[in-house]
Each structure stands twice: as structure tokens, then as C-alpha cells.
Image (cartoon, grey):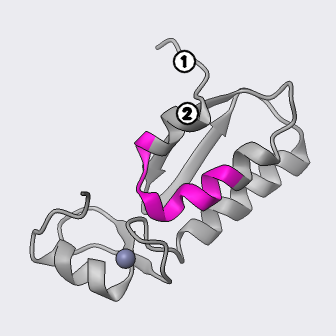
Amino acid sequence: MHKDHITLHDAQRQVGKGWHELLLEAYRNKPKRVVIVEVKEKWGGLRITPSMADMAYYDLLDEIENRSLTICEVCGKPGKPTEPRGWIKTLCPEHAEAYAKGETLWE
Ligand SMILES: [Zn+2]
């Protein structure tokens, strides 16, 4: 599958607002020659895939992914991975409850 480069604007549409700060950080610290080819939620975490990068940038992306597992994807408050409906989402207690009840998380 052909992979295009993902702009920050595109990236922000792939995941919830709670993680937009993390995306900003990833894009702000991105070396110029590095292209982001994929941004998605995977196993409850924020997965950002660069075309290629140096170790320092891979380390930052790993660190951001680890941090995303402690931040509600919806609102940005402290959260943790939860799995009430068959797949993992990282949510705060309030949004985890809404999610478990089947309410829509996204406005
Ligand atoms: Zn929340």
C-alpha cells in the first residue's frame, strides 16, 4: 500500500483531541528530512510511524506512545487503557464509563 506523508492537520483527524498536544510535540521535534507516514491509535496507544529517523527521534516517538497510554484520548486528562467493548482505548474514568455504556466519545 502506498503511504503518503501525513501532515499535522491530517494526523489530528486520526486520533482524539486529548492526544493533540502529543502530536504537536512529535511534529515540533521532527527532524526536517523525516516524514511521518502513519498516525493511528493502536492497542490504546498513539502510534506515529516515520519514514525513517535517527534513534533519538524513534526514542521520542516511543516515549510519546508510552505517555499516550496515561492520557485520555478524548479529553487529555489522566487515563489508562480500558477494554470494555472488545478493543483497547486509553480513557479517563469519566470517558471510560461513557464508553462502557456505548455512548459516543467524539463530538
Ligand atoms: Zn476523558
Residue 88 x, y percent position in the rendering: 33, 65
Q: Amino acid at mark 1?
A: Lys
Observer-nearest of 42 and 18: 18
**Location of residue 13 by image quarter:** top left
The residue indicated by pointer 1 is 3
- Which SS does the magenta portion mostly show? helix
Residue 43 highlighted magenta (yes or no)? no
Residue 107 x, y percent position in the rendering: 24, 57
The residue indicated by pointer 2 is 38
Residue 16 highlighted magenta (yes or no)? yes
- Are dots 1 and 2 in contact, CB under 8 Å? yes
Observer-nearest of 46 and 76: 76
Judged from this view, the residue extending furthest toward the bottom is 93
Q: Earlier in the sequence, mark 1 or mark 2?
A: 1
Q: Is residue 80 above or below residue 63?
A: below
Q: Is residue 104 above or below residue 91?
A: above
Judged from this view, the residue extending furthest toward the top is 2
C-alpha separation, residue under disc 1 versus residue under disc 2: 8 Å
Along the horizontal axis of the image, is 62 left or right of 23?
Answer: right
Density class for disc 1 (Cα within 10 Å; few <14, some 14-19, many ≥20) is: few
Stretch of the chain drawn in magenta: 13-24
Q: Residue at left 49%, top 44%?
A: 12
